[in-house]
Amino acid sequence: MGSSPAARIFSDLVLLKDPSRIDRGSKPINRETSVTSVLKTQALVLGGTLAVFWAVFVVNLLLGGSLLTLGIIPRTMIGLRGILFAPFLHGSLSHIVANSIPFVALGWMVMLRDERHFIPVTLAGMIGSGLMAWLLGAPGTVHIGASGVIFGYLGYLMLTGWYTRSFGSILLSVIVTLVWGSLVLGMMPGESGISWQAHIGGFLGGALAARGFRIPDAPVKPNAKPT
């Protein structure tokens, strides 16, 4: 007997495979095994990245905070290296704890949408947040933390439903907006110690990634003319 419509919707929401990725000639697969394998891979990637965050945090503590100089220093040539290093640097325990949960939650939702998008969206968030902090940050400040990447995930997830117009992506965008939408307040300037510039840049990077991964409209075929 075939699976119920509810079971099919749940499985498709977990995998969120677009039609172009379905191998019509392949043999039937065990959906439960496939979902379990995907979730294990996602947990390994997210857990491994989070472990690197915490390892760098511990090493930085042992070195007396000297690694923080690798962050983004606005409008300095040496500060550009922070675009690569800043997401792995956190200045305090509360800082890294505050970033760990949304990084895992939103990063997993990006994978839930499409695991192939995780690295490009992560890079878009890193580059967007890094460049915005470098361009608009106050002189003499150092910008660190994974929040720019997190806002990249947020921008991607909130807008992917608008650009792809599929049921799964729209549902995902609605859920993320309802649960995590209040994070956009972090893009408001004024709060001391918060890199709102990085937040804006990361969000824009994620939004551009969502637009880049949109499914183009099918070309309209001209009406056949009688010969």
Image: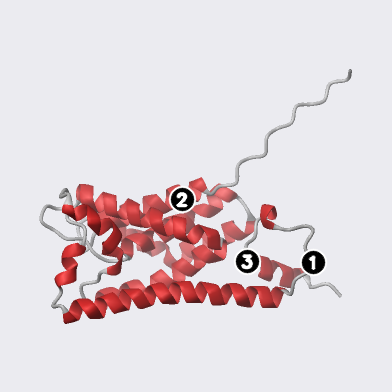
Task: Answer yes or no: is residue 97 visible.
Answer: no
Q: Mark 2 is on which residue type?
A: Ala
Residue pointed to by mark 1: 27
Circle 1: element type: loop
Residue pointed to by mark 2: 209
86 or 110: nearer the eye?
Answer: 86
Q: Position of residue 129 (x, y in %)?
A: 31, 54
Disc 2 versus disc 3: distance between alpha carbons?
19 Å
Circle 2: element type: helix
Contact (Cβ within 8 Å) of mark 1 with mark 2: no
Q: Mark 3 is on which residue type?
A: Leu
Mark before the other along the chain sequence, 2 or 3: 3
Residue pointed to by mark 3: 15
Q: Mark 1 is on which residue type?
A: Lys
Q: Position of residue 162 (x, y in %)?
A: 54, 49
Q: Which residue lies furthest to the top in this view?
A: 227
Residue 184 is tagged as: none
